[in-house]
Every structure is written in C-alpha cells, then in structure tokens.
Amino acid sequence: MTISQKLDIFYLENNLSEKGGEDDNYFTLQFKFFAIKLPNSEFRKKAVYIHDIQHILFDCDTT
C-alpha cells in the first residue's frame, strides 16, 4: 500500500476533508466547548500532509 492510499484511508476513517483539507479556504480548530474557523494559510496547505503522515506512522488518533 502506498502512502497516498494510507492517507486516503486515514482521511475517510477520521471524517476529514479530501487531502486533509489542503484545498479548503478555511479550517476549524475544535476545542472542548467551542470551535474557531481560521484561514487555511499557504504554509498549512503545504505542510498538512506531513502532519497527517505522522498520525499514521505513530498510530495516533486525531483528538
């Protein structure tokens, strides 16, 4: 299985946007009692998949 395939499965299993929201204009930070909607910066768009690969490699959940 390729990394790309594992990422696709990871996004589906964790109810995340396709490509981890890389193409979205905004993303949401969810806290216990509230959420904040923030612009999806170019840096975040370029780095989000690396962060997501770390979740897969270290078998970490997204909470």
Image (tube, helix red, strand yellow):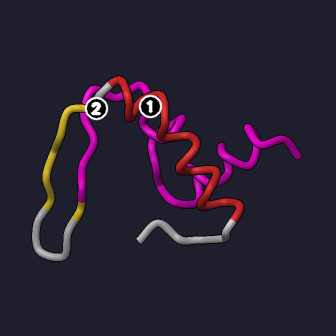
Image coords of residue 28 (percent x, y)? 24, 49
Image coords of residue 63 (percent x, y)? 41, 72
Dots 2 and 1: beta carbons under 8 Å? yes
**Marks 2 and 1, the one that precedes in the sequence:** 1
Q: Examine the rendered structure and indicate whether residue 16 appears above or below residue 2.
A: below
- Does residue 2 appear to the left or right of 14 in the view shown? right
Q: Amino acid at mark 1?
A: Glu
How far apart are the alpha carbons under marks 2 and 1?
A: 8 Å
Asked whether 23 falls inside the magenta stretch, the response is yes
* Residue range (magenta): 1-29
- Residue 40's disc number: 2
> Residue at position x 56%, y 50% from top?
52
Please name the residue that numbered disc 1 is placed on.
Answer: 22
> Residue at position x 53%, y 50% from top?
51
Asked whether 10 falls inside the magenta stretch, the response is yes
- Does residue 11 appear to the left or right of 39 in the view shown? right
The outermost residue toward the right is 1
